[in-house]
Amino acid sequence: MIRISQTARLWAILLLAVLAPASLSAAPFAAYVIDARTGQPIYKQNEDTRLHPASLTKMMTLYMAFTAIERGQVRLDSQFPVSTNAASEPPSKLGLKAGQRIELRYLIRAAAIKSANDAATAIGEGLAGSEAAFAQQMTQMARALGMRNSNFRNAHGLTQEGHYSTAHDMTILGRRLFYDFPQYYNIFSRRSADAGIAQVASTNKRFLDSYQGADGIKTGYTRAAGFNLTASAQRGNKRLVATVLGGTSTAHRNQVMAQLLDAGFSRVPNRVREVRPEAPALLATRVVRRAQIEPSAAATQPDPQRLVLTASAPPARVSRPAQASTAALAPAPQPKAAREAEPVATGRLTLAASARPVSRRAAPAQVAAAAQAEPAAPSASLVAPVLQQSLRPAPAPRSRSASTAAAITNAGAEPEAIARAVAEAVPQDGGASMSLLASPAPKPRSETVILAAMGEGDLAEPEALEIVSRPAGSGRGWGVTLGMFTSKAEAERLLLRSALQDGAILEGAARHVADTRRGFQPSFANLTRANAELVCERFASRSQECQVVGQ
């Protein structure tokens, strides 16, 4: 009972602190607090009321930039042009000039830390081509993230008709930045950063310094919106994300946020099952263009004057000139029936009226008569019967001697005479010269395998290897150490985040976490001296301990 009464008294004091100043503010007040580990709400007040988000809009601008980087569409060192529209944005601004080009990493720092309007507009125009197209993409991404009551018209958040969001949606977006892009989330906790053309300071420095465990995220202010803040803080295993819209001043906004977080930390359990948000369900619009063809009578109705294939005339006979070899041959005689059936040449071929050829065999008398006749040019039909009755050629003996050839020649074409001539030509030694079994066996092949043939030039001694030594300090024997951490997981996260942010410098570097008595020490090895010193300079700008170690 005592604990319940204390909790009720705390919430009553908090409600009075919120409502009293809110009545004097120009903008309605709204607040929303969730447990970042589960996404469950802890406190709600006008959480779905559509209000002006002011520079909290840049959270979505940065979310779109991080998404484009992870998809490979752009890189941190991509040069973005600055348009006249971007350069003419009102303060807060980085001071960009129309026509200049600047790296995306500097635009992100300026938009996240200083809340520069010109940098946010340059990001949107560089990613989508125009600020209007980028605002449309921001709204589509908001729907995919579950932000039901958000609509964006620009990339910076200055007051514009139709540009609105809610405390609920901004809190959801803050949680998304933490879970979807942990490698870039640390930018929201920086107090200052190098933005290329100037050193910028954080607009959220007061709350980050005053509230224990705070590590982000973004502030916002316009006259129509009031003083807005989306914040994230961690204490032990607990992490909360909250949004305040419509504060009367920076101090009032920070005070209300601190009270909301304190009350939230006292209510949430120490250990819960973490529920990470799912990937955004992006919807792609598919445009299909179809050709529009007006129907015509020729395409839909048959033309009575159009030729039909079944009624078309047969093809005309084409006369081909006779070849030289064919002209010399006498035409084969045709039967009388075939000659009568052949139509008169009228320039048109009538296939249905043509007579089929009659198959016949030549009589023996005709064959004999054809063989005795002496035609000027015998045709193939007359020569074929004669060739069929001719004798097959006698096989030649294996011996190619002159005597054997002469004996076969003198023997004539009689088979018995040829066999007798071959027998007389065989030697009396049993035909050893022609016997395959009596032939000498081939010599066995050598088993020696010749791998390569060596010429005279290969007999020389090999050239001595030349050993080239580099002077000390020119190799990759340098590294950096990044302080001490209480857990190995925290040290590994720092190494991974650093490798993603400074990939060009740390390319080829080896990551290692040493388990020492004082704690876990992350380090990068296999660096050149110049790269090691440059890495430490960048870590020093992030307020991170770094020390160069050499060989």
Image (cartoon, rainbow, N blue to C red):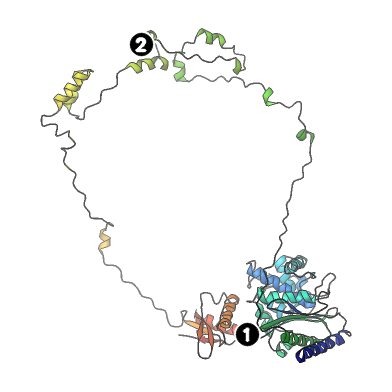
Q: Which mark is residue 75?
A: none
Amino acid type of the residue tagged 1 in the rendering: Ser
- Residue drawn at 60 percent across, 76 percent down: 501
Q: Position of residue 19 (x, y in %)?
A: 86, 85
Quarter residue 36 falls in? bottom right
Residue matched to label 2: 371
Which numbered disc flags the more N-terminal residue, 1 or 2? 2
In the foreground, 506 or 270: 270
The outermost residue toward the left is 428
Q: Relative to 549, is 422 on the left or the right?
A: left
Residue matched to label 1: 541
Amino acid type of the residue tagged 2 in the rendering: Ala
Q: Is residue 30 visible?
A: yes
**Label 1 secondary element:** helix
Quarter residue 223 falls in? bottom right
Q: Position of residue 39 (x, y in %)?
A: 71, 76
**Label 2 secondary element:** helix
Tell me if mark 2 has few (under 14), some (14-19) or many (20+) residues whose alpha carbon lies within 10 angstroms of its own.
some
- Gap between marks 1 and 2 measured at Cα: 115 Å
Q: Position of residue 256 (x, y in %)?
A: 79, 86
The outermost residue toward the front is 1
Rendered view: 165 above or below 5: above
- Residue drawn at 16 percent across, 41 percent down: 440
Q: Is residue 118 visible?
A: no
Q: Position of residue 409 (x, y in %)?
A: 20, 20
In the foreground, 224 or 261: 261
